[in-house]
Image: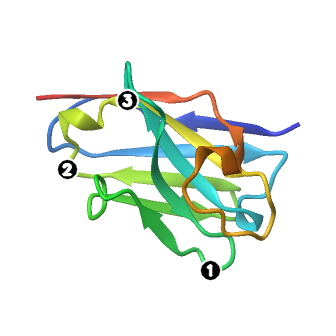
């Protein structure tokens, strides 16, 4: 059974940093694209960042580029999202996701990600 468990969310002030973790079991993070998405109240879930399986190349939404960084620890089967210079508009529930397909670079569409965590709340106050 696949489980993705996020942690690290919280309440911070604008300009602060947070690191989210996503511990995976039942799937191997190095064999598929892993992504982070977020959903703010009243808004659709949106792509934040992705990490390719093959060479660990990262790609991000324009809104977070230069501030957020994804990484992974293969030994711990865990992916991370380092968030710097947080803004109030970053407030959302953040979800870790694993692509359905192994060994494929799937892009940004939520529909390509079949495995989801329960989410962790990030709140940034101004």
**Circle 1 residues within 10 Å: few <14, some 14–19, many ≥20:** few
| Residue receiving disc 1 | 55
Q: Is residue 33 above or below residue 42?
A: below
Mark 1 lies on a secondary structure that is loop
- The residue at the far top in this view is 42
Answer whether residue 10 is visible to the viewer in this image: no
Q: Quadrant of residue 114?
A: top right
In the rendered image, the quadrant that contains the C terminus is top left
Query: Residue at (37%, 29%) from the top-left corner?
Result: 92
- The residue at the far right in this view is 1
Residue 92 is marked as: 3
**Residue 14 place in picture, x, y as percent:** 15, 37
Q: Is residue 88 left or right of residue 60?
A: left
In the rendered image, the quadrant that contains the N terminus is top right
Q: CA distance from mark 3 to mark 2?
A: 15 Å
- The residue at the far bottom in this view is 55
Query: Residue at (31%, 59%) from the top-left corner?
Result: 62
**Circle 3 residues within 10 Å: few <14, some 14–19, many ≥20:** many
**Residue 50 place in picture, x, y as percent:** 53, 60
Query: Residue at (66%, 45%) from the top-left corner?
Result: 111
Q: Quadrant of residue 118?
A: top right
Mark 3 lies on a secondary structure that is strand
Q: Is residue 54 above or below residue 122?
A: below
- Answer yes or no: do the residues labelled 3 and 2 have beta carbons within 8 Å? no
């Amino acid at each position: 059974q696949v489980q993705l468990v996020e942690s690290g969310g919280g309440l911070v002030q604008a300009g602060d940093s947070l690191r989210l973790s996503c511990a995976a079991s039942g799937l191997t993070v190095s064999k598929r694209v892993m992504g982070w998405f977020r959903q703010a109240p009243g808004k659709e879930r949106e792509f934040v960042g992705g990490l390719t399986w093959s060479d660990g190349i990262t790609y991000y939404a324009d809104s977070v580029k230069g501030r957020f960084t994804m990484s992974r620890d293969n030994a711990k089967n865990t992916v991370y999202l380092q968030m710097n210079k947080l803004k109030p508009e970053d407030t959302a529930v953040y979800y870790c996701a694993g692509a359905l397909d192994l060994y494929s670079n799937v892009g940004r569409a939520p529909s390509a990600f079949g495995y989801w965590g329960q989410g962790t709340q990030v709140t940034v106050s101004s």
